[in-house]
Image (spheres, rainbow, N blue to C red):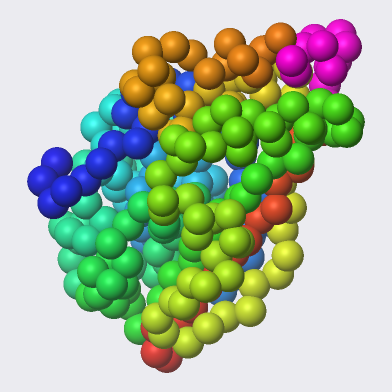
Amino acid sequence: MSGGFTDHFGSVAGAYAHYRPTYPPPLFDWLAAVAPGRHRAWDCATGTGQAAVALAGHFSEVVATDASASQLAAASPHPRVHYRQAAAESSGLEANSIDLVTVAQALHWLKRPRFFAEVERVMRPGGVLAVWSYGIPHLEGETADGQLQHFYADIVGPYWPAEKALVENGYRDLVLPFESLQAPSFAMDVAWSLEQVLGYCSSWSASARYREALGSDPIDHLRPALAAAWGEAETPRRLHWPLTIKASRLGSA
């Protein structure tokens, strides 16, 4: 698409859809509770639709947009989710038509001032903007986690885009427009096999950039080291992500 969009995940869209963790159901219960209505939600930068499909359990219609055609091609279908290729700053949505706008693990990629102006245009009075991200994962077992952290920081570390810094500091410096809403605490925990963890790491934007730059797969470095620390490959280990959510409300309903 035009507008200087860089597709960080186009080459790993299939892995992204298959290996990315799902978000906790209580998060979507809370979002539906604070929205002024449950008619229409917009999931911006939807990727392969993880958040959009979860929102569809609470809203009559979810419009899920992304600038990446590859991501949308790998998105999960749902009868109440309508996927559309569009830039975050130019959604094509009608003014005053949205109860809830969400951005899951993607706000750091957007042109935020222009996106916030688009949110203000399309959202109903009293509508809610909610953005969230998960930071550096931690793996059960000190040795196994050490190998994961080494891969994150040292093997693919130089290939993280600069925007990733906003995620790594837990959106600490992020200021949303409108009236701030206090969000509850949520956690993301899974029990995954060795192959699932490797697949997840393979879906990182830094892993894709490493492959493009060097012509080899960084997972080839991680696999033997993590396997040696893992034990039985099919035995699941707990993986934990810190989840940060910020939300704000436009005016009064």
> Residue most toward the bottom?
252
63 or 214, nearer to the observer: 214
Name the image quarter holding residue 78. Answer: top left
Could you say where residue 208 lies in the image, as x and y percent from the top left?
41, 26
Looking at the picture, how far across and down is residue 234, in whole percent?
Answer: 80, 10
Residue lying at the far left of the rendered structure: 2
- For the record, the magenta segment spans 225-237
Position of residue 185 relative to residue 57, above or below, is below
Q: Is residue 236 left or right of residue 175?
A: right
The correct choice, above or below, for 110 with respect to 76 in the image is below
- Comparing 142 with 183, the one in front is 142
Q: Position of residue 250 (x, y in %)?
A: 39, 83
Residue 235 is a magenta residue: yes
Query: Which residue is at a point 57% across and 28% down the rendered structure image?
Result: 155
Is 135 located above or below residue 140 in the figure? below
Residue drawn 84% across and 17% down?
229
Q: Quadrant of the N terminus?
A: top left
Q: Quadrant of residue 116?
A: bottom left
Task: Please name the residue shown 22% across and 61% down the image.
Answer: 89
Residue 20 shown left or right of residue 64 in the figure: right
- Check residue 29 for magenta coloring: no
How far from the left and from the top, in percent, is residue 45? 35, 49
* Residue nearest the observer in this picture, 38 or 187: 187
Number of numbered discs: 0
Residue at 73% x, 65% y is 185
